[in-house]
Each structure stands twice: as C-alpha cells, then as structure tokens.
Amino acid sequence: MIRSTVCGVGSALPRRVVTNKDLEQRLETSDEWIVQRTGIRQRYIAAEDETTASLGEAAARRALESAGMTPADVDLIVLGTSTPNNTFPATAVEIQERLGMRHGFAYDMQAVCSGFVYAVTAADLHLRGGTAKRALVIGAETFSRILDWNDRTTCVLFGDGAGAVVLEARDGEGTIADRGILASALRSDGSHKDKLFVDGGPSTTQTVGHLRMQGREVFKHAVGMITDVVEDVFRKADVSAEDISWFVPHQANKRIIDASARKLGIAEEKVVVTVDLHGNTSAASVPLALAHAVAQGRIKRGDLVLLEAMGGGFTWGAVLLRW
Ligand code: ACO
C-alpha cells in the first residue's frame, strides 16, 4: 500500500515583526485585549517585496533542503492560499517557475484556513493514485494585503508567512504503524459563507476586497466542527486521543485550540501552539506550526501527528499521519 510520507519540512516569515504594542500606536486596542481574547502577541507582516510566491518559494526551498532533495526531485506542487499573487495564473505555477521547474504540474487550493489540510489531502490522492511521485505541499499567505487596517475587530488577528512539506510515495504495510498519511476527512458548508469572507472579487466588484468576519459566529461553530471531523479521522484510523503524539491545530485563536483539545481529550502538553508568535496565517498556520515543532526537536520520526483546520466557507478538515 502506498503511503504519502513526509520527508522534509520548512517555513518562511516576513522580515518585519509587528507586536500588539505596535498596533496600540495606530488603533484603539490593547495588548491585554488581544492576548486575553486570542493568545496572539505578535505577527509578521510582509514588506512590498515579500509576496505569497516569494514566501512560498522560501518555505519550499527549506523543505526540499531538509528532505535532501532539489526541485528536480518533485513532480507536483499544491499551494494552499487565499491571497495569490495574481487572480491567475496560479501562484503555485509561479513558485514552480521560481524553483526552476519545467516538469510536473502545480495548482492552487483555495479553502481559506483549511487550505493546507485540503492541499495535503489532494497531494496524498495524487501520490496514491500514481499521478505524481513526490509533492511539495505549501501553505502561503499575505493576509495583511486583504485586511481592513481600520477595522480593529479583524486586523489584529492575522499575519503573513509560509510553510511547506515534501511528501513522497513510499510502500507501507497498510497498518497504522506505517509512516505517512493514515487518514483524512474534509468538509465544507457554504451556508456559512457570510460569516467569514472577502467583500470583493474579479467576477463581482473587480476589486480584491477586504476580509469581513462575524467573529462570535465563527467562534460558536469552530469547536464543534473541529472535534467532529477529528473524531471522524480517529474512527477511520481506529485510534483514540491517547494515541496522538502531537496535535497541530490551525492557529486562529488560543481559546478555540484549548477548547478543541479539551473536548477531544488531548493532553495540553501534546498541543503545538504558535498563534502567540505568528497570529492567524490562514493556510500557512499548520505548516508553520509543524516546522516550528520539528525545529524545536518536539515532533520526531515515528510520532503520530494530528493536523486540523477550519476556515471561511466554512471549510474544515483533519489529517492523521505518522511522521
Ligand atoms: N481591541 C479592543 N477592543 C476590541 C477589539 C480590539 N482589537 N476588537 C473588538 N473589540 C471590542 C468590541 O468592539 C466589543 O466592544 P463593545 O462590547 O463595546 O461592543 C468588545 O471588544 C467585544 O467584542 P466581541 O467581538 O464580542 O469580542 P469577542 O470576545 O467575541 O472576541 C474575537 C472577538 C477574538 C474575534 C472572537 O470572536 C474570536 O476569536 N472569534 C473567532 C475568530 C476566528 O478565530 N477566526 C478565524 C477562524 S477561521 C480562519 O482562520 C479564517
């Protein structure tokens, strides 16, 4: 049985850090309010020369380096993003070009904050179906470009960045002792589309638009949706919360992360939290957290790792893999 196995991970952040104190200078907000409500202490904000493509390329190069590979070794790029460099072509294709790749294929996956979880699941299907052998799966965002910087209810929450993994099709035994992706589940429900959206687009306003969110409404649905899809993955793989080595959730809000872990019965010390450092980086948040935990020596080969995300749409999903 083919298993899509992680063999490299990398990340990239913009040069500039913006702290909550920095935001206090320009908005009616406070470090205390932001930390209490969200757990966010700082975020990285892209300069003009830093784009979704440049950050995605940098993360991809680091992931390839950690896998001991070059761009010649991969034949698929799937990029989770909602902030592409251009409406088209896909930013994945731009990253392909930046990496000097003229072979294989590349496309963008648009599932907002669930983008990386969706992209990993799509890449897994390509590897298991034989349409690719090795994939770069990237989450890269420049949400700072679609924020309304006069709206304190949203602009303090988000940041920019990118993370990437290299997946390789390898033979497994078909048991949960295998390394690689063991189970995944994806969901969406467009009846929630007005709770978190961007108020512009090519076919409607011919503008890029700004992010709009009913924060309380998102909060209300998040924990139930996250725990439901994670429990589905547990059932598919026949594992329970105690079997998990690391829980790497989407980093939107510390309160949502804590409540989800509590409801699932996952011990606090197994939860990877980076929302304090990065803010909510949408599709980049899970691979950024993965790269952070690997760099700290926490996630190690053989560990059972649970990824989860929920975002605009709503979209949500979870992936269980052995590192
Ligand atoms: N600084 C200071 N005060 C603020 C700020 C701010 N940045 N923003 C809002 N306030 C005020 C409000 O105006 C309101 O004041 P009022 O009572 O005088 O009207 C008060 O704080 C409370 O506002 P609420 O919106 O009710 O605050 P709440 O406790 O719900 O927290 C938050 C808001 C943090 C957005 C919360 O609802 C939340 O985390 N929601 C989930 C959002 C999320 O995680 N989204 C991302 C998930 S999907 C994705 O990642 C794309």
Image: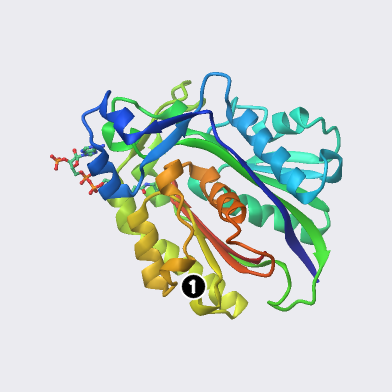
Tell me the crowding category of disc 1: few under 14, some 14 to 19, or many 20 or more residues within 10 angstroms, Cα based. Answer: some
Residue type pointed to by label 1: Glu
Name which residue lies at 80% across and 59% down.
169
Which image quarter: residue 120? Answer: bottom right
Q: Where is residue 246 in the image (x, y as percent from the top left)?
A: 54, 66
Name which residue lies at 61% across and 32% down.
55
Which image quarter: residue 245? Answer: bottom right
Check disc 1 and report the residue beneath it: 231
Name which residue lies at 26% across and 39% down.
31
* Residue 287 shows up from this direction: yes
Q: Where is residue 234 in the image (x, y as percent from the top left)?
A: 54, 75
Which image quarter: residue 57? Answer: top right
Please name whichever residue, 264 or 109, is drawn nearer the observer in this view of the structure.
264
Q: Position of residue 170 (x, y in %)?
A: 82, 63
Which residue is most to the left? Answer: 28
Which residue is most to the front? Answer: 297
Q: Is residue 175 above or below residue 160?
A: below
* Residue 187 shows up from this direction: no
